[in-house]
Amino acid sequence: MPAIVSEETFGRAEERLALNKTRSPRRTKTPSVVQGLVTCGKCGYALSRRSTRTSARKIFYYRCLGSESWRHLNGPVRDNRPMRKERFDDIVWTEVVRLPEDPALISAEIGR
């Protein structure tokens, strides 16, 4: 099949795409401790990370997918409020650090 663009143009486009992936303001790949690993204790839906912007900074929080009315025909499944990412991550890390200190917790998790 004949080329639509020259090799040089294609190479520049690939370089630009690589730069956009790392420097784009829409880039959402910021580190998160529990993203994709935690589910809601009330309804079992996953917690997803969201963000909002204030005049000073960007604020991240976790939200239960069961509490989003647009996902469910009859309205939200749960009435859970979003939880700030920093607070939630601190709670998780406290438990992660505590786990190796208590062998009973480790054996309970293995048996689960």
Image: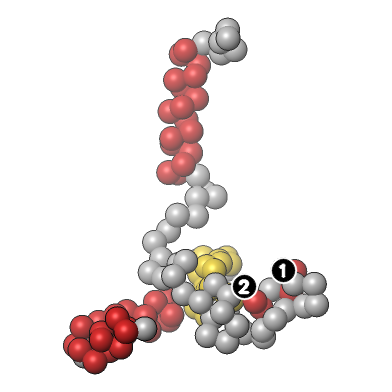
**Does 69 sit left or right of 15 as displayed?**
right
Q: Are marks 1 and 2 in contact (CB under 8 Å)?
A: yes
Residue type indicated by callout 1: Arg
Which quadrant holds the N terminus? top right
Q: Position of residue 62 (x, y in %)?
A: 52, 74
Q: Position of residue 30 (x, y in %)?
A: 42, 58
Secondary element under disc 2, as helix, strand or loop, is helix
Residue sitting nearer the eye, 59 or 109: 109
Say few, some or many: other residues with alpha carbon within 10 Å of mark 1 (under 14 / 14 to 19 / 20 or more). few
Residue at x 46% of width, y 13% of height: 8
Secondary element under disc 1, as helix, strand or loop, is helix
Q: Position of residue 45 (x, y in %)?
A: 58, 75
Residue 77 lies, with reference to residue 16, above or below; the image says below
State the image quarter where residue 33 is shown. bottom left
Q: Position of residue 105 (x, y in %)?
A: 27, 89
Residue 57 lies, with reference to residue 28, above or below; the image says below
Residue 59 in sight from this viewpoint:
no
Residue at x 72% of width, y 68% of height: 71
**Does 106 sit left or right of 90 as displayed?**
left
Residue at x 52% of width, y 85% of height: 41
Residue at x 43% of width, y 36% of height: 19
Residue 85: image tag: none
- Determine the CA span between mark 1 and mark 2: 8 Å
Say few, some or many: other residues with alpha carbon within 10 Å of mark 2 (under 14 / 14 to 19 / 20 or more). many
> Which residue is identified by label 2?
65
Residue type indicated by callout 2: Leu
Residue sitting nearer the eye, 7 or 76: 76
> Which residue is identified by label 1?
71
Identity of the residue furthest to the top in this view: 2
Disc with the residue nearer the chain's start (1 vs 2): 2
State the image quarter where residue 87 is shown. bottom left
